[in-house]
Amino acid sequence: MRVSPAEKIANYVLLVAFAAFALAPILSIVVAALGPPDTGEQTASLLGVHPGNFAEAWRIGHFGTYLRTSLLVSVIVVLVSVVLSIMAGYALGALRFRGAGVVLSLFLLGMMMPNEVVVVPLYFDLRALHLTDTLWAVVLPQIAQSVAFGTYWMRAYFRSANRSVVEAARLDGAGHWRTLWLILVPLARPAIVTLTVLVFMWTWNEFLIPLVMVTAESLRTAPLGLAFFQGQYTQGFTLLAAGACIVATPVVLLYVFLQRHFIAGMLEGAVRE
C-alpha cells in the first residue's frame, strides 16, 4: 500500500511533536543542571555554562558510593534473573509437562503483585532471616520480580521459535541443556538483550525496596541517594538537577549502546509468519 506525501508529512509532524513532548522535561533538567548555581557558591563557567555543577553535586552528594552500589545490585540482579528466566522460559515454552499451566500462573501472579503490597511482609521475613540492612535485602526481592517478567518474556520467544531447529538438534543427540545454550540462546540474542536492558533499567530505578530494606548510607542506591541529597545536602534546584543527570546517565548510556538490539528484540515476533 502506497503512502501519499501528505500522509508522510503528517506522520513526521506527529512524531516530531511527540518527541518534543517527551524530550522537553529532560532538556529542562539538563539546562537547569548547567545553569548558574542557586546556592551562592561559584563553580567553573564556560560561556555561561557551568559544568562544574556536576563535580560539585558529585562531591557533596557522595554519588560515587551510590553509583557503585547501584551498579553492583543491577549487575547481580540482571545476571541471575536473566539466566533463571532463560531456563524457566525454555521449560515453559519449549517443553510439555504436567502442571506447566499452574507454574505459569504463579509467575504471572508475581508480575501482578505491586511492591507496595508485599514490601511490609517481605521486610519482616528478611528481618527474621537477619538479611535486612544487607545487600541481599535489596538484591533478592528484585531478582524475584525480574524472574517473573523474564520467564513470561522468554517463554513467549521460545514458543515462537522454529521447532525444526530443536527437532534437528535432538536428532543429532543434543540434550535439553545443549539445545538451549548452544542453539536457542544464540538465536534469542535480541530478546535476551531487550530483557537485559529492561531489567537493568527497572533495577537501577527501584526506590521503594532500598528505602525500606536498608538504612546504612553505604548500601543506598543512586535513586535513594538522590532523594537524600535533596533533603540533607542542598535546597537548590541546580545541584539537584545535576545529581539527577548523574543518576540517569548509566541507563541512558546502556540504552544507546544496545539500542539496535533492544529495538530488534521489541519487534521480534512481529514479522514472524
Image: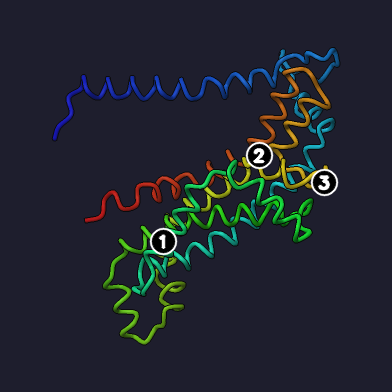
Disc 2 to disc 1, how far (Cα)? 28 Å
Q: Is residue 271 left or right of residue 268?
A: left
Q: Residue at x 44, y 74 (%)?
A: 182
Q: Residue at x 27, y 20 (%)?
A: 10
Upstream in sequence: badge 2 or badge 3 = 2
Q: Nearer the viewer, residue 30 or 136?
A: 136
Q: Helix, strand, or loop for circle 3?
A: helix
Q: Residue at x 41, y 68 (%)?
A: 90
Q: Helix, strand, or loop for circle 2?
A: loop
Labelled disc at residue 16 = none
Compared to 226, does 44 lie above or below?
above
Q: Which residue is mark 2?
A: 207
Q: Which residue is mark 1?
A: 104
Q: Callout 3, which amino acid? A: Ser
In front: label 1 or label 3: 1
Quadrant that contains the C terminus: bottom left
Compared to 47, does 156 lie above or below?
below
Upstream in sequence: badge 2 or badge 1 = 1
Upstream in sequence: badge 1 or badge 3 = 1
